[in-house]
Amino acid sequence: MYLMKDITRDGDPVLRQEAADVQFPLSAEDRKLADDMMEYLVISQDETENEKYKLRPGVGLAAPQVGESKRMAAILVPGEFEDDEPLFKGVISNPVIISHSVQDGALDMGEGCLSVDEDVAGFVPRHDRITVRYQNLDGETVKLRLKDYPAIVFQHEMDHLHGVLYYDHINQAEPWAESEDVKYIK
Ligand SMILES: CC(C)(C)[C@H](NC(=O)Nc1cc(F)cc(F)c1)C(=O)N(CC(=O)NO)CC1CCCC1
Ligand SMILES: [Zn+2]
């Protein structure tokens, strides 16, 4: 299983590369990569387990963050309440945004990243609503419409596959400057 020591940190060139397409059917190696990334998220979101292994609770993890420059990311967006089903749980490959809202969305607290130890403050403007097409672990093409928090998570992880980090989007001059057509997400 992955521990924090296995997560690449800002400065490692792999985080700034354009990742390679995932080939289907999945190799045994890529299947293990997918399982290991999802396992990290599941364990990291369990109070006792994450304490035991000192893991930062993660909602998404992209392959470049474990040193693999491949277009694959695991996403586990918890439901509203403790016992709810997750809003999304899956490993996506070769994702593409095929359409999006004109309106932007940004988390009102800003963002962080498992690969960036120092939080960089400021709004991270993204699309508020997206239609994303990706391949699931069986190689089937899936089309998904997302909005608000899940849409932000997907865009954050998809950025990693293109060598983009969240603070690249922050207005350095005025990090917390509010603009008209941005929806600030709780
Ligand atoms: C960097 C960190 C602060 C750990 C961030 N977690 C987070 O924002 N909150 C969180 C964590 C949970 F486990 C469950 C939950 F509902 C909320 C995160 O996982 N990421 C993922 C990442 O770095 N992927 O590369 C950063 C998030 C910022 C916006 C979207 C992803
Ligand atoms: Zn990240």
Image: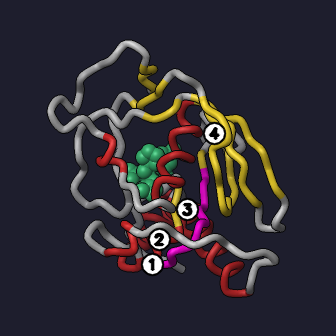
Give the total number of marks visible in the rendering: 4
Quadrant into which the C terminus falls: top left
Residue 113 lies in quadrant:
bottom left
Q: Is mark 3 within 8 Å of ligand 1?
A: yes
- Neighbour tally class for label 4: few under 14, some 14-19, many 20 plus, Cα within 10 Å: few
Q: Specify the amino acid type for callout 2.
A: Pro
Q: Which residues are magenta?
A: 67-76
Q: Nearer the viewer, mark 3 or mark 1?
A: 1
Structural distance between the alpha carbons of marks 3 and 4: 14 Å
| Crowd tier of the residue under label 2, counting other residues whose Cα lies within 10 Å: few below 14, some 14–19, many 20 or above | many
Mark 1–mark 2 CB contact (< 8 Å): yes
Say which amino acid is labelled 1.
Gly
Does 74 appear in magenta? yes
C-alpha gap between disc 4 and disc 1: 29 Å
Mark 1 falls on what kind of element? loop
Residue under label 2:
64
The spot of residue 30 in percent (x, y) is 67, 80
Q: Residue under label 1, please give it.
A: 67
Name the one closer to the observer, 15 or 31.
Answer: 15
Badge 2 marks a residue whose secondary structure is helix
Depicted 93 relative to depicted 80: above or below: below
Q: Which residue is mark 4?
A: 79
